[in-house]
């Protein structure tokens, strides 16, 4: 709680904006904003986002601090089976929310009905473009499922020990040329 307040307070001071002006823009009481900045209160994410924006900051930089102040904890990495089960549960939930359409109707544009059926039954974890297409066909938003798919991908990679001994050379990482240019400036 204190770190979030400290970070917001620093941003407020850096912005030169008074607590009263920020409170007015956020449609909050000045005393509430003052307690937030002092680390005495933890507001909801929309308030943190709004204050960070009002103070000229990037709200995303405060997300982990806010989650920590809220006591949010994420489960440790799961094994492949556990991660795949969570993804399948989410896909099945979307399938149910879509009123269980016939699997044949889910096929088309980068998604075969067979793969859709196999994914819904937990027989296969499709690649991301296929998973994204399935989520879209089920009326969901792919971004809401992406982290679950990445958990499966990560669990699979770590279970197969595919990381090269000694590490990856920086030059082989995506965006390395951009990083090297930035390092030179």
Image (cartoon, rainbow, N blue to C red):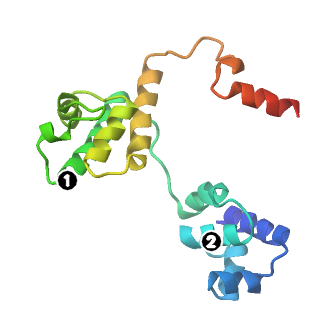
Q: Residues within 10 Å of mark 2 (few under 14, many from 20)?
A: some
Which of 23 and 1 lies nearest the eye of the viewer?
Answer: 23
How far apart are labels 2 and 1 at the CA level? 34 Å
Which residue is situated farthest in the top direction here? 165
Q: Position of residue 60 (x, y in %)?
A: 62, 56
Position in image of residue 127 (x %, y %): 36, 28
Instruction: Identify the residue shown where x is 76% and y is 82%.
Output: 19
Is 76 located above or below residue 125 in the figure?
below
| Residue labelled with disc 2 | 50
Q: In which quarter of the image is residue 75?
A: top left
Does the rendering let one see residue 172?
yes
Residue 138 badge: none
Front: mark 2 or 1: 1
Point out the residue furthest to the right here. 185
As displayed, is residue 127 above or below residue 22? above
Q: Toward the viewer: 1 or 31?
A: 31
Q: In which quarter of the image is residue 3?
A: bottom right
Q: Quadrant of residue 184?
A: top right
Q: In this view, does 61 lie to the left or right of 114?
A: right
């Amino acid at each position: 709680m204190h770190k979030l307040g400290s970070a917001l307070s620093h941003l407020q001071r850096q912005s030169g904006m008074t607590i009263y002006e920020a409170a007015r823009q956020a449609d909050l009481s000045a005393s509430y904003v003052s307690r937030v900045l002092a680390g005495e209160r933890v507001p909801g994410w929309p308030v943190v986002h709004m204050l960070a924006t009002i103070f000229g900051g990037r709200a995303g930089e405060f997300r982990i601090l806010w989650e920590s102040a809220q006591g949010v904890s994420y489960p440790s990495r799961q094994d492949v089976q556990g991660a795949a089960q969570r993804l399948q549960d989410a896909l099945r939930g979307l399938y149910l929310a879509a009123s269980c359409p016939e699997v044949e109707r889910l096929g088309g544009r980068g998604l075969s009905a067979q793969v859709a059926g196999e994914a819904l039954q937990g027989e296969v974890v499709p690649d991301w473009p296929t998973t994204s297409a399935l989520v879209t066909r089920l009326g969901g938003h792919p971004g809401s499922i992406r982290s679950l798919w990445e958990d499966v991908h990560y669990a699979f990679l770590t279970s197969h020990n595919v990381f090269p001994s000694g590490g990856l050379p920086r030059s082989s990482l995506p965006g390395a040329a951009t990083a090297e240019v930035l390092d030179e400036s």
